[in-house]
Amino acid sequence: MSLEHAIDRDLMESPDFSGLASTQGSQANRQQGKSGAALSNRITSVLAGSYADLEIRDALETLDQRGLINNAETRRQLRLDVQRELIQCNGEVVQDFGKVADQLKRIGAAVENLNKCCAQMRASIAAASQETAPVLEEANTLTQQKTQVETKQHLLKAFNAHFHLSEDDLVTLTSTAEPVDDEFFRVLTRTKKIHEDCRVLLGTEDQRLGTQILEHSGKQLNAGFQKLHRWLQREFKMVDLENPQISSSLRRALRVLAERPSLFENCLDSFADARENSLSDAFYSAITGYSSDPDFKAMTKPIELFAHEPLRYVGDMLAWAHSATVSEREALEVLFISQGDEITKGIQTGIESEPWSHENDEEAIFDGRKALNQIVNRAFSGVARQIRQRIQQVIQSHEDPVLQYELSSLAIFYSGTFEKLVGGEAVMIETLEALSEAALSQFRANMRDHVLAAQNDPAPVSSDLSPPDFLDDALDRLRALMKSYDTSFASASKNTTGLQVVFSEALDPFLVVCESHSEGLDEPEKHIFAINCSSVTKAVLSYHRFASDRLGELDETMHDHVTKLIESQHRYFLEKSGVLQLVEILESVSDEPEDLKRIPELGSFKPEPLMATSQQLDDFLPSALMDATQNIGLLRDTKMAQNITEEAAARFCEDFEMVESKILAADDLADGIDQEGSGGEEENPKLRDLFPRTSAEISVLLS
């Protein structure tokens, strides 16, 4: 409301409003009605105006920015001032537009001049274009030709860089004066790449270039492999396998050369020959202390000078061969096994490139361990020959069968050891098996000589029935042989083949000879002699558990002789006591009364013979056990002799009890007959009265 009052006041005080009021006053009379209506409309329009309009607001803000003082003078001059300023501004604008018009005129002139120049230039350019068109066309053609030439140059450069070896690379690849190093392998790899990539060129319409490059690269590749092959042969002759740091170039060369199977196999053959010569010389040096190498210095004592015993001499040689085999295998594993499947891959690549070299091979895949075993086998073939010669000399120059068996066992032990190292087809294993068989053959021959000497012994059985000297000697040898077997590899592996050889050659023939000698003796001497021989043999075998089977067989043999000896002692009791004839007669007499009645009528049961038998029995009984024991007193085992005698005495007691029972039965039948037919006839004496000894008395006297 204050703003409306201020506006009203301003309107009232403004010159226009004052002028309007004075005009209305002067014309009041004339236009009273008309003026009143106009004023009313004016006031209405002023009051009806919106002071929130943006234009009014902007006008007020502009008025406020002029810093005017709100008084009557200012309000009266406001319109004039504003109009004056508006006129001034309009004048300045007109002046500025005039300047702009002048500048536009100058610009128009300049543009016109430029248009004229452009027209002239277009004319000149058109004329020049007509004149230079052939030149530009020719230049464009030359540019295109230059681009094509540059492209061909790039292609030629790239082709030469890929399919062409430089002179330096060719020298590195083929010259023997250049070393086989990383640069050589780089060039060789690049040459192989060129050779393989020529297949792409052979797929084009014009194959001449591909064929030429293929032929050229093939020659270069073959020259490189030949250089590598010769270098490997030289290195193999000088390589020191005892050095743990084997050249990596050597391993890499083997892996690369494997791509040429023929050269690779040839190289392996050369290597095996070189190792054979080296190992043969090393073995000879270890044996004798001398070597073909002038720079050789013996590091250990020669075997043949310090191994005085034949077994130690052979053992030292085989131990050296085993140690050398282990070292050789470990060193060769670095060459052939540590590469993994690289050599196998190389061999397979070579087979694909040389299919004609393996037409008849069903399995041409390279086996690193098999190749290693083959090389070790060939490398030790010379050592195997020397070992065979020297061990054969030892076998032939010694006749001790124990030594020969020990040599055979030693050869078998090392044969199994070498089989674990180099497989079952090694020449060293064949050599050791042959030596083992040779030692066993010599062992058998010597044992046959001893058996023949035992068979031809003029006095094989002594008077005391003790084992013969040849059996004692045989048992001494058997004891040594079983001790050797017990400490050998065969015993630990439960291999009884060697044990059967020992028994069949060193024991059984002598026992057979003893058995044959005993056949010429009477009983009981033959059984006593056989038991004495078996007893000493059993005493030797009982110290070794592995002889349990043979002990069982020996016990069965002894049991047979003991049984026969008991029968002999039993017969001795019967014969010396006189009871034998009674037993023989009564064995045919049954227990039937009719048979029992006839006993007194039998010859040996008549009074006089029966009384004589009774007297003979009484004379025998006091010293019966002593006499029976003395009868087999030459039996060395007194305990066994006692048991045999007791068993024979027990059987005698059983026989006597049978005789007694039938005598008593016969007497009982005779008493019954006498009672039924008692008359004047004289009674026969009772058998019991003629033969009064009882079985109880016999048992007491013989116990």
Image (cartoon, rainbow, N blue to C red):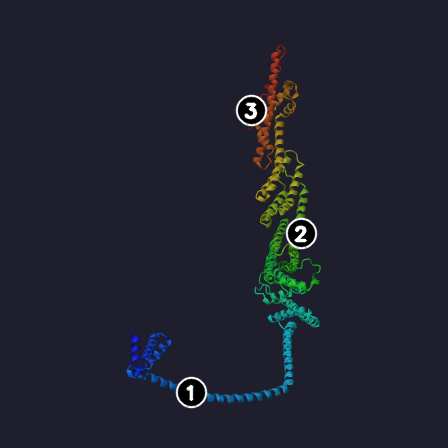
Quarter occupied by residue 389: bottom right
- Mark 3 = which residue? 697
Residue 649's x, y, as percent?
58, 29
Q: For this view, does 100 lie left or right of residue 296?
A: left
Give the CA separation, mark 3 to mark 2: 68 Å
Which one is in front, 309 or 73? 73
Residue 164's x, y, as percent?
65, 74
Which residue is found at the position 67% from the left and 46% from the top? 448
- In the displayed structure, 127 sits above or below 248; it is below
Quarter occupied by residue 235: bottom right
Quarter occupied by residue 334: bottom right
Looking at the rendered structure, the secondary structure element under dot 1 is helix
Residue 455's x, y, as percent?
68, 42
Q: Earlier in the sequence, mark 3 or mark 2?
A: 2
Which one is in front, 701 or 46? 46
Which one is in front, 563 or 278? 278
| Kind of residue at disc 2 | Ala
- Mark 1 = which residue? 94
Q: Earlier in the sequence, mark 1 or mark 2?
A: 1
Which one is in front, 172 or 392? 172
Mark number for residue 438? 2
Characterize the local packing of mark 2: few (<14), some (14-19) or many (20 or more) Cα atoms within 10 angstroms.
some
Give the CA separation, mark 1 to mark 3: 187 Å
